Amino acid sequence: MNKSDLIALVADKTGSSKAEATTALDAVLDGIADQLADGNSVVLAGFGTFETRARAARTGRNPQTGESIDIAASTSAAFKPAAALKRRVAGS
């Protein structure tokens, strides 16, 4: 499923137009992204938690040359599913 499929699904389930569903979905995604950019987590009960995770700097290896390289520290977005979502996906 891609974004346009999701928009169509939201429009169908809510009885709204695709334009309204697009606006709503974009607002939700922008809100989540803004909170993550500010270092906050977003908890959706029964669905999961969007959060940021810090990766420490480390030494890696170039697979082509075998040479050691320094990999800088970074922060990335992560999603941790709630127990209810895990059960639903597992079919329980």
Image (tube, grey):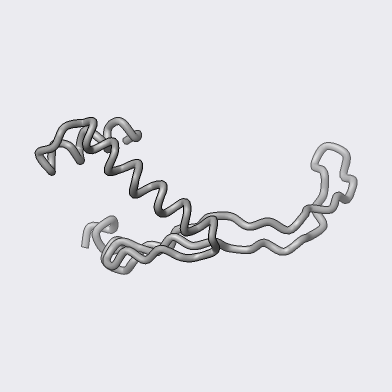
Name the side, left or right, on which 67 lies relative to 48: right
Residue at the spot 20% in from the left edge and 41% down from the top edge: 10
Residue 69 location, x and y as percent? 86, 49
Please state, as top left, top right, bottom left or bottom right, where the N terminus lies in the image. top left
The image quadrant of residue 7 is: top left
Residue at the spot 73% in from the left edge and 58% down from the top edge: 73
The image quadrant of residue 62 is: top right
Residue 50 location, x and y as percent? 44, 60
Residue at the spot 30% in from the left edge and 61% down from the top edge: 47
Residue at the spot 29% in from the left edge and 38% down from the top edge: 23
Name the side, left or right, on which 14 lies relative to 86: left
Name the side, left or right, on which 51 lies relative to 12: right
Residue 70 location, x and y as percent? 84, 53
Number of numbered tags placed on the structure image: 0
Residue 79 location, x and y as percent? 45, 58
Please state, as top left, top right, bottom left or bottom right, where the C terminus lies in the image. bottom left
Residue at the far left in the pictured view: 15
Name the side, left or right, on which 80 lies relative to 60: left
Q: Nearer the viewer, residue 89 or 44?
A: 44
